[in-house]
């Protein structure tokens, strides 16, 4: 089955692009921040500079690791779900669950090694840029030189490989435990229900987010900017929890909007039918929107509240406060870039897989314009749902921090900041879905339905 895994990678490279890019970008982020530890261990790096470099590597790199593992798991799950018919065929000719599991893990492991090795060069460039940012903000002396060494390479290769392998094991376990008839049904309908473990983990992440919010409101009250240490991570925990619940959320949203959408005619009816059949794919697509909105809104408004509190106190920003602000901006940049690419990857992979579906719809009488209209409606629903869930997750950060920092649950910051985040999420979702659908529609309908 390992040989089959590598042949599958060669023959079906396009199907693994989303997973590969998630691993590649994840390894780049991990190694870039891990190189701060190599730099901190350099000659004549002591005191505040060493502490700043270590904090940058551990805090941002740690959250980057969590996002990378989650992204890799999501893309691998989508890839395996799209191959449900292939898995069912292998089972029907005698493949055992253990053999299928080895094939899935072998594919992921091979991708992880290649992605991590190719990520070394961009990680060096990203690490240099990060140190340059620290030099420009005077948090690290200019004489501290950049170092990319064994810590960065070991963490990049090791964590990418381990996270991809663990994600593949989790994905393979569910895929291989389903019977042949259930696999065929999942391939044709795409309505597999979330597992009990997924629901348990969703509840765990939401409880952790609630715990961080409560700690911020109580124990961290009147602690100044130190409250960022607990409130800053609550939005990511809540976003992951809601993302894990996304299949249930999308099913509920589809049920609520079915009536109004059908009033739009054939396009709306197609959208409802497709969303009901593709709950899993819709859930995978809404996940990066939730992560992007939650982290961007939460961090931007948290920093705005901190800046307002500092101005109200009439004191100048200290070096530590400037360092925290830079750290927050780096977090935003990292999350925006990573989730944007994750969103594009997921939508492109999901839409490309629908070429046969689009062909069948056109042969049944739908025009290309109606197909594009259907995808546009789906994109609007994805954006609204993802932004709403992401905003709820951001509340776990900005409201407790406002209470702790200035005794008010109302965050500081401009409404235009929020609208800019929403607009970016909408543009990324709409433009990617439209472009991928137009490309899929270039294939003649008859050719698209052929195996």
Image: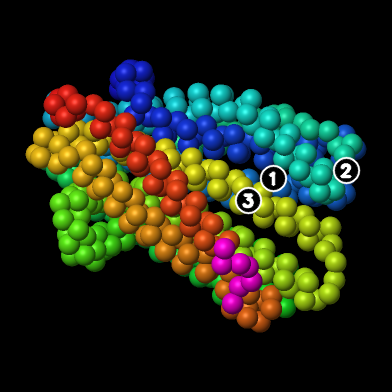
Q: Residue at x 25, y 32 (%)?
A: 441
In the image, taking residue 287 as reference, residue 401 lies left or right, namely right
Q: Residue at x 19, y 58 (%)?
A: 264
Answer with the quarter of the image where residue 359 lies: top left
Q: Is residue 417 above or below residue 188?
A: below
Secondary structure mostly seen in the magenta stretch: loop
Provide the residue designation for mark 1. 57
Query: Residue 417 magenta-drawn?
Result: no
C-beta proximity under 8 Å, tags 1 and 2: no
Q: Of the two numbered discs 3 and 2 on the same chain, state the one appearing first in sequence.
A: 2
Q: Which residues are magenta?
A: 410-416
Q: Of the two numbered discs 3 and 1 on the same chain, state the one appearing first in sequence.
A: 1
Q: Residue 49: image x %, image y %?
A: 84, 46
Crowdedness of circle 1 by 10 Å Cα count: few (<14), some, many (20+)? many
Quote the CA–CA distance across marks 3 and 2: 22 Å
Instruction: Report the quarter where the N terminus lies.
Output: top left
Q: Visible in this render: residue 42?
A: yes
Answer with the quarter of the image where residue 389 lies: bottom left
State the mark number for residue 141: 2
Q: Residue at x 61, y 67 (%)?
A: 414
In the image, taking residue 423 as reference, residue 310 lies left or right, namely right
Provide the residue designation for mark 3. 331
Q: Is residue 432 above or below residue 124?
A: below
Asked whether 344 or 52 is in front, the reply is: 344
């Amino acid at each position: 089955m390992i040989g089959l895994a590598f042949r599958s990678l060669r023959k079906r490279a396009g199907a693994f692009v989303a997973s590969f890019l998630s691993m590649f970008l994840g390894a780049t982020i991990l190694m870039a921040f891990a190189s701060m530890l190599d730099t901190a261990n350099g000659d004549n790096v002591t005191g505040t500079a060493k502490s700043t470099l270590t904090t940058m590597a551990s805090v941002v790199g740690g959250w980057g690791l969590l996002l990378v593992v989650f992204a890799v798991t999501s893309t691998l799950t989508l890839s395996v779900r799209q191959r449900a018919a292939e898995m069912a065929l292998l089972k029907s000719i005698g493949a055992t669950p253990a053999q299928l599991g080895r094939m899935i893990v072998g594919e992921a492991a091979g991708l992880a090694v290649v992605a991590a090795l190719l990520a070394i060069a961009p990680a060096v460039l990203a690490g240099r840029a990060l140190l340059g940012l620290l030099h420009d903000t005077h948090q690290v002396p200019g004489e501290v030189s950049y170092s990319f060494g064994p810590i960065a390479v070991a963490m990049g290769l090791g964590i990418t490989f381990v996270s991809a392998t663990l994600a593949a094991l989790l994905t393979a376990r569910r895929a291989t435990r389903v019977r042949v008839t259930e696999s065929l049904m999942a391939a044709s309908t795409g309505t597999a229900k979330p597992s009990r473990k997924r629901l348990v983990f969703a509840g765990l992440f939401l409880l952790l987010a609630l715990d961080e919010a409560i700690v911020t409101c109580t124990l961290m009250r009147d602690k100044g900017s130190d409250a960022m240490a607990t409130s800053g991570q609550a939005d990511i925990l809540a976003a992951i929890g809601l993302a894990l619940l996304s299949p249930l959320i999308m099913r509920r949203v589809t049920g609520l909007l079915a009536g109004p959408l059908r009033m739009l005619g054939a396009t709306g009816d197609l959208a409802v039918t497709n969303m009901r059949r593709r709950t899993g794919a819709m859930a995978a697509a809404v996940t990066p929107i939730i992560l992007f909105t939650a982290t961007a809104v939460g961090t931007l408004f948290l920093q705005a509240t901190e800046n307002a509190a500092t101005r109200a106190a009439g004191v100048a920003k200290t070096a530590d406060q400037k360092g925290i602000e830079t750290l927050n901006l780096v977090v935003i940049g990292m999350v925006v870039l990573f989730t944007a690419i994750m969103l594009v990857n997921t939508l492109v992979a999901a839409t490309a897989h629908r070429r046969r579906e689009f062909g069948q719809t056109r042969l049944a009488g739908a025009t290309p314009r109606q197909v594009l209209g259907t995808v546009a409606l789906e994109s609007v629903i994805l954006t609204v749902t993802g932004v709403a869930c992401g905003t709820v997750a951001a509340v776990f950060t900005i409201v407790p921090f406002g209470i702790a920092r200035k005794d008010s649950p109302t965050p500081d910051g401009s409404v235009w900041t929020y609208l800019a985040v929403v607009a970016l999420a909408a543009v990324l979702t709409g433009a990617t879905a439209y472009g991928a659908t137009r490309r899929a529609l270039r294939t003649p309908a008859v050719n698209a339905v052929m195996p």
